[in-house]
Image (tube, rainbow, N blue to C red):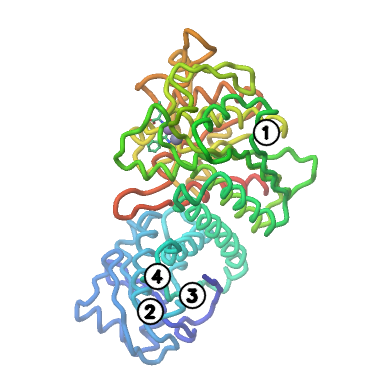
Amino acid sequence: MEFSIKAGAPEKLKSGCIVVGIYADMKLSRAASAIDAASGGALGKIIKRGDHRGKRAATLLLQGVSGIQADRVLLVGLGKQSELNQRAYAEILRAAYRAVAATGATDTLITLGELAVEARTIEHKLTSIVLAAHESVYRFDQLKSKKEDAATLRKVIVYVDSSEARVATRCVARAEAIAQGVDLTKTLGNLPGNICTPTYLASAARQVGREFDFKVEVLDKKQIEALRMGSFLAVTRGSAEPVKLIVMKYQGAGAKDAPVVLVGKGITFDTGGISLKPGEAMDEMKFDMCGAGTVIGTIRAIAQMGLKINVVGIIPTCENMPSGTAIKPGDIVTSMSGQTIEILNTDAEGRLILCDALTYAERFKPQLVIDIATLTGACVVALGHVNTGLFTQDEKLATALLGAARDAADPTWRMPLEDDYQDALKSNFADMANIGGRAGGSVTAACFLARYTKNFRWAHLDIAGTAWKSGVEKGATGRPVPLLTTFLQKLAL
Ligand code: BES
Ligand code: MN
Ligand code: ZN
C-alpha cells in the first residue's frame, strides 16, 4: 500500500475514486460541496431523490460525474456531526474502504481527514485513515493454494488542507510505520504453530534487525541453561521444538541512554501441557505468541520511524506440550532470580517463561519495562475483547500508557494490582505457587510477575482478549502495537 498527500481543489485532483461525506442532516462535507458545485449539482440531485440520507457508514457509488477529475465518487454517510467520535469515524472509514474495494479502482482520494471528529486532532485522524487502509487490504492467504479476493486498491491519496500538508507528511509516514508493524504482528500471529516455531520467530526478529540495522541475539538452550533460567526451561521440557531467547537491541539514542525493555510472551503453541486444555478452540492457542509478535512489530515500527530512543526486546519462546519429559503438577523449579516456584498447573506457563525474561531485563538497567502477554483467560472474562488489561503500581506509567492508548485508539483499561492479592500465591512447599485459584485470575497472574520486577519501573499488558478475534473473523489484530508505538513516540520526544 502506497500513500501520498494532496491539497488543493478536490474536483481538480485525479483519482480512481474520490471519497466524500454527507451528514445525517443532508449537509455535505467541504469536499463533497466542491464536487457538487463542479458537477453542476450531481450530489444535490441524489439527496433530493432520497438516494442517500447521510446515515452513518452508508455508501453510494457514483459513476460518470461530470466536471471533476476523479473516475468515481463514493458518497459516504457521516451520521450526526454531534455523534462523530473516534468509534464512528473508524466505522465510516471501514465502510468507505470496503465500498472502494468493491470497485476496480486501484487508487482512492480520501477527503475524510477534513471532518471534525470529537477530541481528535489531524494527527489522530490521519493515523486512522492509514491504519484502516492497511486493515482493508490485509490478507492472510499465503497458505491457501488459490488466492481468492486479492485487493486491487494499491494507493491512497490523503487529502488535506494546504495549511496541514507539512504536518500530514510527518503523520502519514509515522502511521505507515505503525501499520506495517501491525501487519507484521498479525502475520506472525496468524501463522500456525507448525510454521511459526521459536526458531521461526527468531528468524523473523533477525530479519527486522537486518532491515533496520540493529543487533538481534538469539540464545539457545545451552545459553539459557547457563543463565539458570530454571522456570523458563521447565516449560519447554515437553516439547521437541528448540527453545530460544530472542534479544532485539534497537539503538536510536546514545549508548548511555537507559533503554525501555519490552518483554513478549512467545508460546508458539499452548496445549496446557500435562494440565491439558480442552479440545474446543485449542487451535487458537497458536496465538499465544502474540506478545512476542507485538514486540517484534513495535520495534519494527519505531525503527522505521527512526525514533531517538533505545529499546530492548526480550522474547522467551517455546511450546507448552505434554509428554513423558514434560513438567508435572507439583514440580518445583528455581527461577533465575533464585525464587522457587511450585508448578500447580502446567497451563499457567506464560508467567513461568516471563519471570525469567523479566529477571534478565535487569542487566540492561532499563528506564522501564513493559511486558505484553496473552496471559490469562480470566482477563478475557473481566474485560472481554475490547480493552487490553493494564497492571502496574506505577501511577505515572499508568497515566502515560492510558494516554497513549487513547491517542492510538487502542483501548486499554487499568486493573488493580495491590499486594493484598499476593496471598493467593502461597505455597506450602516453595516460595510461591504458579497459580492463585479462580478468583481474580488475571490479577494474581500479574502479582506473580510483580515478584520479579522489584528493581525497575514496570507495567504488564494482558492481551488475552485483544490480540486476536475468534469466530468468522478469526485472526490476529496486531494490538497493542499502536498503543506501544505511540507511547514510545511520546517518550522519545
Ligand atoms: N495462554 C493462556 C491464556 C489464554 C486462555 C489466553 C484463553 C486467551 C484465551 C494461558 O497460558 C493459560 O492457559 N492461562 C490459564 C491460567 C490458569 C491455569 C491459572 C487460564 O487462563 O486458564
Ligand atoms: Mn496456558
Ligand atoms: Zn499460554
From this viewpoint, which residue is outermost toward the bottom?
Answer: 66
In the rendered view, would you say 241 is above or below 229?
A: below
Rendering quadrant holding ligand 1:
top left
Circle 4 residue:
147
Of residues 155 and 50, which is closer to you in this image? 155
SS type, badge 2:
helix
Circle 2 residue:
33
Q: Are marks 1 and 3 in contact (CB under 8 Å)?
A: no
Q: Of the residues under marks 4 and 2, which one precedes in the sequence?
A: 2
| Residue 29, image quadrant | bottom left
State which mark lies toward you, 1 or 2.
1
Q: Of the residues shown, which amino acid type is indicated by label 1?
A: Lys
Q: What residue is rendered at 37% in x and 19% in y?
A: 437
Q: Of the residues under marks 2 and 3, which one precedes in the sequence?
A: 2
SS type, badge 3:
loop
Q: Of the residues under marks 1 and 2, which one precedes in the sequence?
A: 2
List x then y, in percent, for residue 403: 52, 43
List x then y, in percent, for residue 167: 60, 64
Distance, label 4 to label 1, CA atoms, is 42 Å
State which mark lies toward you, 1 or 3.
1
Observer able to see residue 444: yes
List x then y, in percent, for residue 70: 43, 85
Circle 1 residue:
222
In the rendered view, would you say 59 is above or below 259?
A: below
Q: Are marks 3 and 4 in contact (CB under 8 Å)?
A: no
Q: Of the residues shown, which amino acid type is indicated by label 4?
A: Lys
Q: What residue is rendered at 57% in x and 48% in y?
A: 201
